[in-house]
Image (spheres, rainbow, N blue to C red):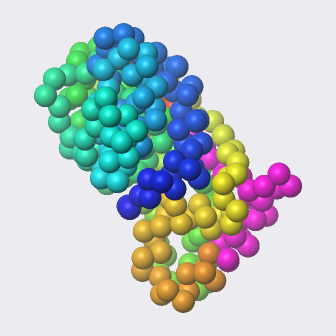
């Protein structure tokens, strides 16, 4: 997945803004070591650091990390893969907002890497897309692709049910403290072209295999199909469903 860090911050800043309650759940303390997994442009890493914690931000995107370093030069950031990252010293907490659902190749490997990065008793506090996330958006995409005679795209996300993810965490040696699964319709205020803009940002890699002349009509059809569910008098809404949890390593 290629990321446009500037567009991510300007047009999709709600990703970071919606993470504020998760920072409260983490409740970082002065002197704690916190790893921000999938840190993006570092906005929430900065919020955690303001509380007095040491923060290391990890992200798979070089562009995101470069932006994070530019914005928060006093914090530590590095490029890394959530499936197999390692750390030199254990952390008190691993934090992750709106990133775990992108680590879809092997969710168990991600959880195992998190566990290895934590000290015993360390906590894993995260929020990701849960089962049902973006159902109307993805349905519109799949239908539009099919109508245009294109091969059904392989969606790049992993949206687990609460039960499924609880089993994964407990099997990996975590004790769940909190697990919430909730709807969070989110205004796409910075998407004048509605669902099409959302697809360009969050599923842009799926357009790589589409003939150039087909891209615009394809995205127009996505908008037509998604509009009945997602376009309201106040504007476009994304049909987000979130899974938020706090767990402790045995």
- Residue depicted at 67% across the width and 45% down the height: 186
Count of marks overlaid on the render: 0
Q: Is residue 146 left or right of residue 32?
A: right
Which residue lies at the image location 49% right of the left edge and 64% below the top edge?
A: 203
Indicate yes or no whether the magenta region holds residue 75.
no
Residue span colored magenta: 220-242
* Residue 234 is one of the magenta-drawn residues: yes
Closer-to-camera residue (36/181): 36
Residue 96 in which image quadrant: top left
Residue positioned most to the right? 233
Instruction: Tell me which residue sits at (48%, 54%) in the image.
Output: 6
Looking at this view, name the residue that lies furthest to the top: 30
Extreme residue in the left direction: 88
Side of 61 relative to 202 (left or right): left
Q: What x and y, as percent, mark residue 204?
A: 47, 67
Q: Is residue 106 above or below residue 194?
A: above
Residue at 57% across, 44% down? 13
Q: Looking at the figure, which quarter contains the C terminus?
A: top left
Asked whether residue 139 appears in the rendered view, the answer is no
Question: In terms of image quadrants, where is residue 74?
Answer: top left
In depth, the one of 229 and 108 nearer the eye is 229
Q: Quadrant of residue 17?
A: top right
Q: Where is residue 112 drawn, in percent x and y?
A: 25, 35
Residue 74 higher or lower than 154, as above or below? above
Where residue 229 appears, x then y in whole percent? 76, 59
Query: 214 or 30: nearer the eye?
Result: 30
Q: Quadrant of the N terminus?
A: bottom left
Residue 238: percent from left, percent from top = 66, 52
Q: Is residue 74 visible?
A: yes
Residue 238 vs 184, above or below: the answer is below
Q: Is residue 110 left or right of residue 126?
A: left
């Amino acid at each position: 997945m290629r990321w446009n860090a500037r567009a991510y911050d300007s047009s999709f800043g709600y990703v970071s803004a919606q993470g504020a309650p998760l920072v409260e759940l983490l409740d970082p303390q002065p002197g704690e070591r916190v790893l921000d997994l999938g840190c993006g442009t570092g906005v929430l890493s900065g919020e955690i650091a303001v509380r007095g914690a040491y923060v290391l931000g990890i992200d798979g995107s070089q562009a995101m990390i470069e932006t994070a370093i530019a914005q928060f030069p006093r914090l530590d950031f590095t490029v890394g893969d959530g499936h197999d990252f390692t750390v030199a010293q254990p952390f008190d907490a691993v934090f992750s907002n709106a990133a775990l659902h992108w680590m879809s190749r092997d969710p168990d490997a991600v959880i195992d890497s998190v566990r290895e990065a934590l000290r015993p008793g360390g906590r894993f506090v995260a929020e990701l897309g849960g089962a049902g996330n973006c159902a109307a958006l993805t349905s519109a995409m799949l239908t539009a692709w099919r109508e245009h005679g294109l091969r059904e795209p392989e969606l790049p996300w992993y949206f687990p049910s609460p039960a499924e993810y609880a089993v994964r965490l407990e099997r990996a040696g975590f004790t769940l403290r909190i697990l919430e699964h909730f709807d969070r319709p989110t205004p796409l205020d910075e998407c004048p072209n509605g669902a099409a803009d959302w697809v360009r940002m969050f599923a842009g890699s799926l357009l790589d295999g589409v003939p150039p002349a087909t891209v615009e009509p394809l995205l127009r059809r996505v908008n037509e199909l998604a509009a009945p569910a997602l376009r309201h008098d106040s504007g476009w809404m994304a049909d987000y469903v979130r899974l938020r949890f706090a767990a402790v390593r045995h």
